[in-house]
Amino acid sequence: MRRQRAMSGASGMTYLPAVCGLAGALICLAGKAAGGELAATRHDGGVRIEVDGKLFADYLISRGPKPILWPVIGPSGVELTRAYPMRLREGEKQDHPHQRSMWFTHGSVNGIDFWSENEGHGTIVHREFLEVSAGSEAAVIAARNDWLGPDGTKQCEDERRLVFRAGEDWRTIDFEITVRASEGPVVFGDTKEGTFGLRVPTVMDVNSGLGGKIVNSEGRTNEQAWGQPAAWVDYHGPVGGEVVGVAILNHPSSFRFPTTWHVRTYGLFAANPFGLSDFRGTKEVDGSHRLEPGESFTLRYRVLLHRGDEVQGKVAEAFAAYAQEKRQ
């Protein structure tokens, strides 16, 4: 289909006529990147990110009790997060249904469980999009969300900014989130059940025995990486006939850098700076954090989707470059 000329809107974003081919699309935006042309398309359920007209990721605001990214597709064209419970895929594990592809939440916020989907859990509700755009280098989604207890009482709010980029052999998703005590004091409790996470495909996980591996910036692998502080962690294995990987890089300006990691050989991959008593196996430490009214903390991560293992994917080099990027 012939691409139509972009038009500039009053907000400064670049708009294209609604001919991007997604039924019910509200807004389409596009721009050229090194690995292809990026587009961000609003739809009733969220925002779809594409590279050269093919799906990269979908930010979904109504598929469960929190916003998620699903699917997430790497540079080789295969999905690099688990499809369950959004879709059943043959041979894929169907455990931990709350581990929905890629997400942000926590297991104890003012004592409320936002991590699981058990009875009495909290819900993170999308309030509004602050930005949906695509420029010459990246596509951007920014949103504001309310954290509600099981009775609907607001506990806090977040503002998150996701930046998508694509190269020939890599893709990245920057995920920056500020949590603010908008309603009163907020305590993020000490629990391993958190916080910024994804679930890798079953064929990639270590326990499947097909070649999956976890390695962190300190050289710790598989079970030894769990609960340890590290600047980055990589999880790679075979998907679609080749070795591919997902790395999460923690920016030095992020709250409690270097973060500790709730990364499991069964496929869970999460950065969690709060679960110190679980990670260290003693109640003599307390990883909880209290925000007074109006206070906030900010977490910053870059998800690197790459071909090969952590060496072939140049994860250490990617972190070194990321660490040099200034953040306010």
Image: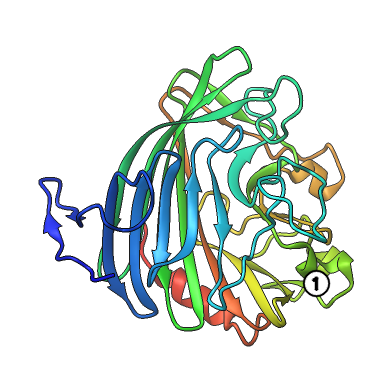
Q: Which residue is mark 1?
A: 221
User: Relative to residue 153, is residue 139 drawn left or right?
Assistant: left
Q: Which residue is situated farthest in the front direction here?
A: 1
From the viewer's side, name the closer residue of 153 and 118: 118
From the viewer's side, name the closer residue of 255 and 307: 307
Q: Position of residue 238 (x, y in %)?
A: 74, 77
Question: What residue is at 18 percent from the left and 65 percent from the top?
Answer: 4
**What kind of residue is marked 1?**
Thr
Q: Position of residue 34 (x, y in %)?
A: 35, 80
Question: What residue is at 53 percent from the left and 73 percent from the top?
Answer: 319
Instruction: Classify mark 1: helix, strand or loop.
Output: loop
How many numbered badges does the structure rendering display?
A: 1
Above or below: residue 260 compared with residue 314: above
Q: Quadrant of residue 134?
A: bottom left
User: Relative to residue 91, is residue 88 drawn left or right?
Assistant: left
Tell me the quarter of the image containing the N terminus: bottom left
Above or below: residue 44 compared with residue 93: above
Mark 1 Cα shell of 10 Å, populated few (<14), some (14-19), many (≥20): some
User: Relative to residue 323, is residue 150 drawn left or right?
Assistant: right
